Image (cartoon, rainbow, N blue to C red):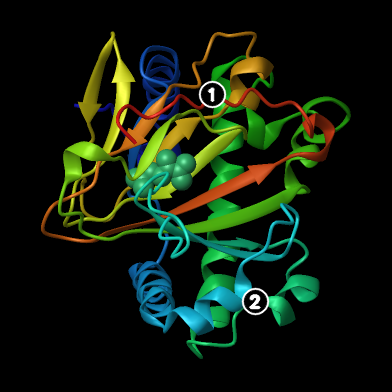
Amino acid sequence: KLPVIDLAKLQGPDRVHTLKSLSKACEEYGFFQLINHGIASESVLNMFQAARKFFELPFEERSKYMSKDQSAPVRYGTSFNQNKDSVFCWRDFLKLSCHPLSDVLPNWPSSPAELRQAVVNYSKETKSLYLMLVKAVLESLGVVEKAENADENDSCDHLKEFEDGSQLIVANFYPSCPEPDLTLGMPPHSDYGFLTLLLPDEEVKGLQIQHEGRWVTVEPIPNSFVVNVGDHLEIFSNGRYSSVLHRVLVNPFKSRMSIASFREFYWIHGVSRTQEQELPGV
Ligand code: AKG
């Protein structure tokens, strides 16, 4: 079972104790589940529904957003390349760059009609949650003493750097797979950023993390995020917090969706330690 962190407790009298639990989770698992995160369930629902509708569009419509340019404001990808006999992994994705919103928005898909608004709302809400978590992480590392009351010349400057930077929202869609033992939704990898905020499918499991040499399945908790340490935070913390390998299994009967939100800070842009392993049997 993954450690659970209660954001409400982080903001109350239990902060010090909760910061210790946060620290332990980041050291021992590199992952935790975040409850009472304060993001409106409507924003979450709208985000999932709009993304699902996008994946249900005809291929001709979705394929308009395919791009080899890694920095394109929108990129759609599918493992189901009609010209190849094999699949790399069993996943479709829609990557939307959210920075700055006014510049990228006109490039995002215009269909389904509600997608743009859903992503704008969701990205704004996750940005504030992200900053709250970054403050907590810095405090747990002892980089700032108490983030909210931090000395202006010292830690506030430090925190300010976290307010800028890019945000990427990735919707993942894993279709049901007739032979789930032959492929993976996503191969083992660690995330490159500072922290990843993931909304997993509440109905369908699939995410596994590496812990003490085994693959541990994440049990979804309703209305919660899965948060994980990325490579940048592992480096920033001098290896105290771990950026842990994780992967996604596919389901023989049900499709699965997840929404990941990544942020990258300009001052550590370019630091990357991608770990991708070959998939057996694919
Ligand atoms: C990623 O987007 O990097 C993931 O690992 C997705 C995990 C998931 O779909 O549960």
**In the visual, does 61 lie left or right of 220?**
right
- Which image quarter has ligand 1? top left
The C terminus sits in image quarter: top left
Q: CA distance from mark 1 to mark 2?
A: 29 Å
Q: Residue at 64% x, 22% y: name it.
A: 273
Q: Which of label 1 and label 2 is nearer to you?
A: 1
Residue 237: percent from left, percent from top: 63, 14
Residue 33 percent location from the top left of the image: 32, 37
Q: Which residue is mark 1?
A: 275
Is 244 left, or right, of 236 in this rendering? left
Q: Going 61% across and 67% down the picture, which residue do you hit? A: 66
Disc 2 element:
loop
Amino acid type at mark 1: Gln
For the question of whether residue 111 can be seen, the reply is: yes
Say the numbered circle drawn on residue 108: 2
Q: Nearer the viewer, residue 265 or 86?
A: 86
Provide residue 160's location: percent of width, then percent of height.
79, 41
Q: Is mark 1 within 8 Å of ligand 1?
A: no
